[in-house]
Image (tube, helix red, strand yellow):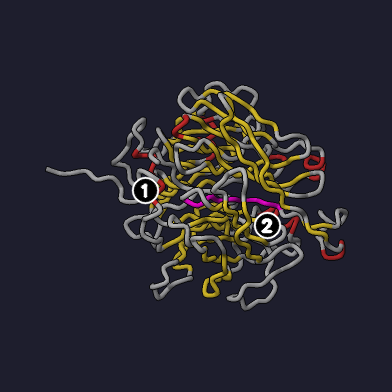
């Protein structure tokens, strides 16, 4: 008699996931900002025992140019073990890789050889728009009942953006997720609290307001996203909207607690119009509603106008531009990427309302151009951007490119890509691994990282 076993990379709880074996490979989305050659998924060897450690061992080029690969994710993860939507015989095998600019989605197979990837299906932008009513797919999460795709625009590239679902077996677009949208118009990230049957979404802007770079008039006019939206996950209906206020712009990355019994999470606000600071907020359950509280302010740093890009000369300061965050599997440490100043910050958030700064590493930065002990080319540009944490919490990886058109606004000389790894002390503290510095091959810039077998921003869990 044949026996079926769940994928060994699925774990019922974050506690057990933290005991998973270390990752051996990292998958990195890379794009050509000039759109002359196809974007690619790069495979990086992150196994210190391997003879090809810290090397790009292969690259899978996309069939077209101009996709702008951005955020991507797995077809299946630990949520397949949930009692409300069990799919225990699914396999974490395929990477769902959208092009943010093209709206084309590639389904990439990581087997039989995880070092040599292949494209098994392509969803063309016309099919995605026709079946879902959306364009500009941004974030991929595997979850109960399907593959969730947050998209920034409707079929015309305007508002409202929202969430589409793909079938987990055929990868066909099924349609729009929302049944009752309520007041929600702008979209960005989407995540959930499985234990509370709640979806959370955040906001950026419509494609015409960012595809050629941030528009100063829209930013300074407070017209980018500044709200969180809370939804009934089963009924797919909008429940509540929280407006952060006129001062705050670009409410971005959602990181709910991994423990499904904890109804809170963290979100970053990229910029304050009052003083160019960035901030971190906790959302939490307050009686029968959701509420938010600002828990961290990260100030801008004064700088001479002569060394600032045109976008910032009038302000005389470098904003931190917190563009990504990640939460360790035990919900203890929050990692914060300051793409403007070059800092990667580690906070102890054991108490989600009273964070303590426990680690800091500076690499790159608009003004500081801080180098890395493994770099041979002196001053580095770009800064900590997409950050990913290993399941055991010991290793923190990041790359330095945000989005092609926006890179050039803040780093007008262009960005030379790199990828680094930090070592995280289990009791707090960060240090750069001097042996891990990848000087990215010219022509493409590295963006999001996914770790083989899962990472701290790929899975959701139903058991504490």
Q: x%, y% of residue 294?
A: 68, 41
Q: Is residue 327 left or right of residue 366?
A: left
Looking at the picture, does residue 127 appear above or below residue 275? above
Q: Quadrant of the C terminus?
A: top left
Q: x%, y% of residue 3?
A: 18, 44
User: At 54% across and 38% down in the image, what residue appears?
Assistant: 264
| Outermost left residue | 1
Local packing at callout 1 (Cα closer than 10 Å; few below 14, some 14-19, many 20+) is many
Q: x%, y% of residue 230?
A: 57, 29
**Start-end of magenta stretch:** 321-329
Q: Which mark is residue 339?
A: 2
Visible residue check, residue 26:
yes
Q: x%, y% of residue 173?
A: 46, 34
* Comparing labels 2 and 1, the label whose residue is closer to the camera: 2
- Report the magenta stretch's main SS: strand
Mark 1 secondary-structure assignment: loop
Mark 2–mark 1 distance (CA, rounded to whole Å): 31 Å
Q: Which residue is label 1 attached to?
A: 92
Looking at the picture, does residue 125 appear above or below residue 38? above
User: At 68% across and 69% down in the image, what residue appears?
Assistant: 380
């Amino acid at each position: 008699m044949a026996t079926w076993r769940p994928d060994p990379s699925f774990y019922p709880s974050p506690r057990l996931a933290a005991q998973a074996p270390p990752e051996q490979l990292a998958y990195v989305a890379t794009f050509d900002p000039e759109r002359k050659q196809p974007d690619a998924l790069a495979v990086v060897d992150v196994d210190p025992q391997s003879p090809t450690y810290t090397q790009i061992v292969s690259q899978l080029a996309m069939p077209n140019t101009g996709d702008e690969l951005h955020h991507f994710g797995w077809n299946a993860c630990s949520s397949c073990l949930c009692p409300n939507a069990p799919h225990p015989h699914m396999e974490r095998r395929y990477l769902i890789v959208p092009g943010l600019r093209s709206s084309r989605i590639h389904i990439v197979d990581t087997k039989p050889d995880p070092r040599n990837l292949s494209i098994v299906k392509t969803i063309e932008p016309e099919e995605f728009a026709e079946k879902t009513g959306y364009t500009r797919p941004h974030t991929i999460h595997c979850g109960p009942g399907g593959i969730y795709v947050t998209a920034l625009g409707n079929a015309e590239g305007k508002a409202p953006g929202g969430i589409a679902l793909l079938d987990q077996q055929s990868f066909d677009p099924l349609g729009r997720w929302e049944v009752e949208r309520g007041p929600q118009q702008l979209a960005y990230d989407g995540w959930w609290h499985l234990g509370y049957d709640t979806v959370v979404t955040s906001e950026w802007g419509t494609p015409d307001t960012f595809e050629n770079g941030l528009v100063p008039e829209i930013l300074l006019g407070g017209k980018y996203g500044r709200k969180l939206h809370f939804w009934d996950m089963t009924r797919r209906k909008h429940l509540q909207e929280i407006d952060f206020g006129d001062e705050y712009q670009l409410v971005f990355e959602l990181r709910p607690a991994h423990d499904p019994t904890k109804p809170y999470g963290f979100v970053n606000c990229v910029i304050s119009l009052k003083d160019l600071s960035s901030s971190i907020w906790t959302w939490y359950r307050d009686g029968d509603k959701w509420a938010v509280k600002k828990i961290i302010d990260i100030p801008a740093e004064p700088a001479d106008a002569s060394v600032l890009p045109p976008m910032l000369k009038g302000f005389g300061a470098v904003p931190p531009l917190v563009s990504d965050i990640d939460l360790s599997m035990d919900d203890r440490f929050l990692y914060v990427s300051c793409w403007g100043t070059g800092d990667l910050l580690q906070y102890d958030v054991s108490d989600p309302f009273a964070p303590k700064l426990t680690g800091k590493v500076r690499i790159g930065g608009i003004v500081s151009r801080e180098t890395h002990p493994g770099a041979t080319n002196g001053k580095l540009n770009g800064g900590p951007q997409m950050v990913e944490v290993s399941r055991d919490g010991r290793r923190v990886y990041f790359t330095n490119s945000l989005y092609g058109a926006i890179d050039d606004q803040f780093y007008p000389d262009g960005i030379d890509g790199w990828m680094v790894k930090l070592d995280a002390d289990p009791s707090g503290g960060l240090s750069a691994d001097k042996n891990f510095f990848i000087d990215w091959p010219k022509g493409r810039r590295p963006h999001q990282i996914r770790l083989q077998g899962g990472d701290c921003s790929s899975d959701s869990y139903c058991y504490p």
